[in-house]
Amino acid sequence: MNIETKETIYVIDIGNTSIHTCYINNGDLSDEYKRYKHGEISLLPWEDIKKNNFTLVIASQLAHMTDSVLNTAKEYRVNTVEVTTEKQTVIKDTYPTLGIDRICNLTAAIKLLQNNTSPIVVFDFGTATTVSACNKDGKFLGGIITTGCETELKALSGHTFTLPHVEIAKEQKIEKLSVLTKNTEDAILHGAIAGQVALTEYFLTNFEKEIKQKPKIVFTGGNCQIISRFYKEKVDLIDPSLTVKGIYYCYKSIFQSLKA
């Protein structure tokens, strides 16, 4: 297979709470970036993938979901490529349980931040907030994982008798964060967002102390636009689609390594 020729692939990113998919034509994402629930594998455009002989490229956090997709693809006789930690060649010095989403995020950041000579830190503000770092050559430096905004909001309402569930969408009405809110919903919402901003600041301050270099900063994930509004320092790249782009670049790296 010649990876340099123009081709369309169908990318599936299986996360902890949902599935994100899109067509990528020679590196360009289609406008039909879609989200499915875990139980909606059958709703994927299998007939279109089969009809056009597209390759299905999957990166997954969940083994049982991977099996479900691969079994369905086999039924439709669709060619598949699974992107895994072991197969990809861009990020080095990984550990076995490192999430493939974090690897894909760093891979995409390396490719998109061209001519970069600094370390890279990717903040993925999703169901979980993950922070992943690598040097300019793709050596994995480490990171942290904590609860995301919406997970924290659901946990508060689910584990208390009096606190209400607050939707993150209410943030649209907030002009600035405050530590002196005057109603319960705002107190919860401002607290959740402030926690993510404070985490970002804390991580970067200590990263620079330990690594002795200022990194390039990348934001992704479903809530990256929200957090970026209140993080006042420079963010070098904000891209909600970073993970699926990373899956594509990992896919390319797999075939390039086979050709070498």
Image: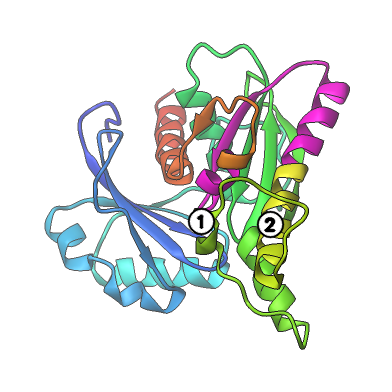
Say which residue label 1 marks: 173
Label 2 Cα crowd, 10 Å radius (few <14 / some 14-19 / many 20+) = many
Picture layout, residue 251 above or below residue 118: below
Picture layout, residue 47 above or below residue 249: below
| Residue 214, picture quadrant | top right
Q: Is residue 29 visible?
A: yes
The percent coordinates of residue 47 (x first, y second) are 16, 67
**256 or 139, which lies in front?**
139
Disc 1 residue type (three-letter)? Lys
Furthest-front residue in this view: 182
The percent coordinates of residue 153 (x first, y second) are 66, 69
For the point 51% across and 44% down, the residue is: 225
Q: Is residue 255 left or right of residue 101?
A: left
Disc 2 residue type (three-letter)? His
For the point 40% across and 40% down, the residue is: 248
| Residue 187, picture quadrant | bottom right
Lower sequence index among marks 2 and 1: 1
Q: Is residue 211 magenta?
A: yes
Say which residue label 2 marks: 190
Picture layout, residue 24 above or below residue 180: above
Instruction: Give the residues drawn in magenta, as a range.
Output: 200-228
CA separation in Å, label 2 and label 1: 11 Å
For the point 73% across and 80% down, the residue is: 163
